[in-house]
Amino acid sequence: MEDFGNANRFWFERHFALKNGIPSHDTFRRVFSLVDAREFETAFIQWAHSAAGELKRISIDGKAVKGSVTKMGPNPLQNVNVYDHESGLAIGQSPANNAGFGEIKGVLDIIDFLEIKKCLVSVDAANSCASVASGLKAKKADYLMPLRDTNTQYRAEAFEMFNTHHPLTTSQTDDTDHGRVEGRYAETMTVARMSDAFKSTYPSAKTIIRVIRGRDAADYRISTRTTKDGGEFIYERNLAERRVSVHEEYYFTSRKMTAEQALQAIRDHWQIENKLHWQLDVAFGEDQWTVRDRIAVRNLSILESVRFFV
């Protein structure tokens, strides 16, 4: 900011009385550390929300500001960001104590500030839990969540259900780009055949979704690693020209969705990573910050969201 001010000093002097010149970087740091971060975040959410208009589809995800690690604590500041798919804008930010339960609390905090009635809200596996689902339904919103890998019981139920019964709807897409072929197949069923434990944990859930992703791409690995029974690693020269991988994931939602709708919504969720977080990291250099004051970092993160907005 100081460098920008000095580079444009003559312009600023035509509009402001700069008796002491352009403020130093220490002055900017002090100012941002004194601004009430919660009030600033609230004001940004209200402004961005009004500019974006009615929310129909949003994604919520956490992001660490890696350069904010201090001697007082090894964990960087963790923010929860909200991305609106209709406008392509960042419309909210809330702090989280850390990844995990701290991030879940950040999600619950930020949805209280949003008007999300009839909005479809997608989250990642870290925030896929009953408290977030119930919090969204309390705001009369719908949710789309993955079944966590660690929730082996519910994943086993879904696996058995899809392998023993015909799905209600199916959908498939194939993409070819830069020598890479990616295929996605989705199928949906109601939650009727899920266990009572699942239905009591997520009483508002209506649809279970299975997505199978296949990828065929050039294999540039120099070597491959395998693990022996004793845990020893074996490295061998990679002779393969192509690398094929298949992944199977499960999702659930409080909406009645077709496989085509579900597949599109699941793909859209990752726009928060590709269009927002990537922009903050690569274009704006957020992870390279050397600011250590947590309040200042929170306020500067909001300014970056405003910058992305504009």
Image (cartoon, rainbow, N blue to C red):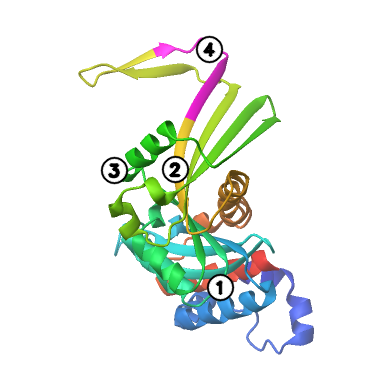
Asked whether residue 118 appears in the rendered view, the answer is: yes
* Residue 251 on image: x %, y %: 46, 47
Residue 250's mark? Answer: 2
Viewer-proximal residue, 223 or 59?
Answer: 59
Check the picture and name the quadrant holding the N terminus: bottom right
Q: What element does badge 2 sit on?
A: strand
Q: Which label's residue is closer to the chain start, 2 or 3?
A: 3
Q: Which label's residue is closer to the chain start, 1 or 3?
A: 1
Q: Amino acid at mark 3?
A: Gln
Whether tag 4 and tag 1 are in contact, CB under 8 A, the answer is no
Q: Amino acid at mark 2?
A: Tyr
Residue lying at 48% horizontally and 72% vertically, measured from the top left: 111
Measure how far apart labels 4 and 3 are at the Cα level.
36 Å
Q: In the rendered view, would you say 306 is above or below 15?
A: above
Viewer-proximal residue, 219 or 33?
Answer: 219
Residue identified by numbered label 3: 153
Q: Which label's residue is closer to the chain start, 1 or 2?
A: 1
Q: Amino acid at mark 1?
A: Lys
State the extent of the magenta-drawn residues as a range.
236-246
**Residue 277 figure quarter:** bottom right
Residue identified by numbered label 4: 240
Measure how far apart labels 2 and 3 are at the Cα level.
12 Å
Residue identified by numbered label 1: 117
Residue lying at 45% horizontally and 16% vertically, measured from the top left: 223
Q: Dot 3, how many residues are within 10 Å of its Cα: few (below 14), some (14-19), or many (20+)?
A: few
Measure how far apart labels 4 and 1 are at the Cα level.
51 Å
Q: Dot 4, how many residues are within 10 Å of its Cα: few (below 14), some (14-19), or many (20+)?
A: few
